[in-house]
Image (spheres, rainbow, N blue to C red):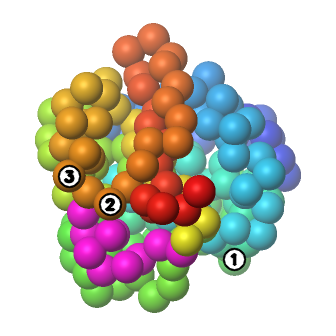
Amino acid sequence: MRIIGGKAKGTKLYTLEGENTRPTLDRVRESLFNILQFKLQESNFLDLFSGSGACGIEAVSRGARKAILCDKSKQAIQIIKKNVEKTHTKEKIEIYQTTFEEFLKTKLNEKPDIIFIDPPYNTNFAYEAVKIILNNELIKEDSIIIIETDQEKRVKQQLKELEIEIMDERKYGRVHLIFLEPKGKG
């Protein structure tokens, strides 16, 4: 796994060993950031379930003002810190070792422009995260939320009860990216 674009382009990243994490594939990450390229500049980027930190590091490499990385795993946080050091992005990255619920309810101090949610696939964490974000008014009117999943039908069904609209969807093999915005924005 490597950083695909921007100032840290080509830097190989450390990854977590084992079956507990599933890094976003380079081709999916490249497509995601091509879609976000005009929104990304000077943005605040939140990466929940950060894993290796690749998405947040990619965001600052490509021009985000700041990336906030959250993961509950001690091993993930250790890898993130190594990757941040390796890519020389420390001044633009905040790292939190906590659950997504705790982070969203008590640690997030500003409303992000872009929120990337890539939880373990066989959970309701994407729905729960979006619900907390909306209930606590943690997004701006023009914020974008992106969910990565391989169970898009289930996730989309869950999202129907929330005040959120699907603005775009992309499929890359088994992986789906679902782009969301607050209802009534358009």
The residue where tag 3 is placed is 161
- Between the C-alphas of marks 2 and 1, the distance is 35 Å
Badge 3 or badge 1: first in the primary sequence: 1
Extreme residue toward the right, this view: 7
The residues colored magenta run: 131-140
2 and 3 marks in contact (CB < 8 Å): no
Could you tell me residue 167's position as x and y percent? 52, 42
The residue where tag 2 is placed is 163
Q: Is residue 183 magenta?
A: no
- Between the C-alphas of marks 2 and 3, the distance is 7 Å
Crowd around label 3: few <14 · some 14–19 · many ≥20 (10 Å) = few
Could you tell me residue 6's position as x and y percent? 83, 47
Nearest to the observer: residue 159 or residue 73: 159
| Residue 91 - label | 1
Crowd around label 2: few <14 · some 14–19 · many ≥20 (10 Å) = some
Nearest to the observer: residue 63 or residue 39: 39
Residue type at tag 3: Glu
x 41%, y 77%: residue: 138
| Residue 63 - label | none
- Between the C-alphas of marks 3 and 1, the distance is 39 Å
x 39%, y 65%: residue: 70
76 relative to 87 in the view: left or right: left
Secondary structure under badge 1?
A: helix
x 20%, y 52%: residue: 161
Residue type at tag 1: Glu
Secondary structure under badge 2?
A: loop
